[in-house]
Image: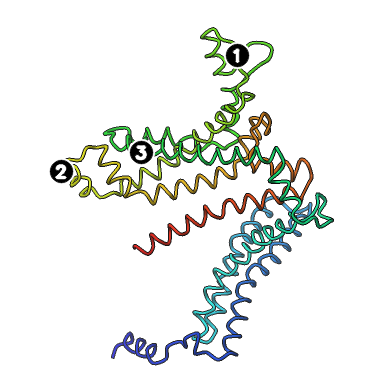
Amino acid sequence: MTERDKLIEVVEEDPPLPEDDRSPLMRLGLTVLRFLSAVAVPIVAFIILWLSFEWLRQADVNRGVIVLVALGVGVGGIFALYWAMDYAVNRMPEEWRESVRPWVFVGPALVILSIFLLYPALNTIWLSFLDGNSDKFVGLENYGFVFTDDGMLRAIRNTIIWILVVPSASVGLGLGIAVLADKLRRGEAFAKSLIFLPMAVSFVGASVVFGLIYKYKVFGAQTGLLNGIVQGFGDEPIAWLSQEPWNNLLLMVIMIWMQTGFAMVILSAAIKSVPDDILEAARIDGATEIQVFWRVVLPSILSTVVVVMTTMIITVLKVFDIVFVMTNGESGTEVIAEQMIRWFFRNDHNGRGAAIAVVLFLAIVPVMWVNVKRFRAEEAIR
């Protein structure tokens, strides 16, 4: 009998006990070990980093030493910490190892996410029931403000319009460009790179660029591109960002310009994954290229289209930079995220800002639920 056969025989003779067959005391011990494994790494890492930063704050420490210590602690120290935890797990009884080991590596991430995501979320919900200074409980008064204030109602209306226009236009343009680019014999990569290039620009940077396009001057020569074209045709210049409701559409154009490249890249990859045999069979049966697209290609990539659409909807719900830079939320261009920032940081009203944040979160949850449900359906098919 070889060593491998002996090892297999030993494993088969003494398999780990199923979770249900363990005694209550053993299950309690495993639960405690899992908890300690999850919190040990964050706690020890925090202590080490805190002590290191306290030492690095000393004025007489050499800059080179600071860099070396930061690299040593931040990279080597964390690696050593995980290695030590894994070594400790290997010293445990065999029936405990595989139950505890995942918590050593996944647990710290869950603890950190709970601290930096779950706690702020719960705290924001609590703040939404308090007054502006977070001193007095006011119940649902802040939520009443969200759904009755004129500015908030305009923000909700505008956000809904953004959700309807931006994802639809971006996905539609991205899909059209992806299909056309797929037909190119040469220069496909170059063409896609040009369309995708705006993704490398931040929302603030894109807003500054389009600010030069929409620029309007009350006195002096017009330097905005659009007004230059308008004056070239002999008409008077226009204050584009003050023209309601068209100023909202002009702001949406910025995001469409940026997100079309993202949609194109994802959808182009999905189109290329459609089997050629199916496409050729459709063409042999007499289908035109338009029919091939609508009846073969689009149904095949529909799940990808839904994912891209939901991703863009979430991005649109969080849009703030474009509105803040271009119009500061004036002239009827308010959106929910901009109002949240305004009430939190500019009007110093924690209760209303938190209530708007909670409403925004609740608006995103159904979109995330659709995304998760779609992923589960795909996994079930696989």
Q: Quadrant of the C terminus?
A: bottom left
Closer to the chain start, of discs 2 and 1, is 1
To which residue does mark 2 refer? 284
Direction from residue 320 to residue 315 in the image, left or right: left
Work out whether 143 lies above or below 380: above
Q: Which mark is residue 181?
A: none
Residue 59 position, x and y percent, is 79, 52
- Residue at screen point 55% across, 45% down: 315
Q: Which mark is residue 178?
A: 3
* Amino acid bearing label 1: Pro
To which residue does mark 1 refer? 237
How much space separates mark 2 and mark 3, taking CA atoms?
A: 24 Å
- Residue at screen point 47% across, 55% down: 371
* Amino acid bearing label 3: Ala
Residue 183, quarter of picture: top left
Would you call the spot at circle 3 few (<14 residues within 10 Å), some (14-19), or many (20 or more)?
Answer: many
Residue 100 position, x and y percent, is 54, 78
- In the image, 214 versus 201, the foreground residue is 214
* Amino acid bearing label 2: Ile
Which element is circle 3 on? helix
Residue 326 position, x and y percent, is 63, 30
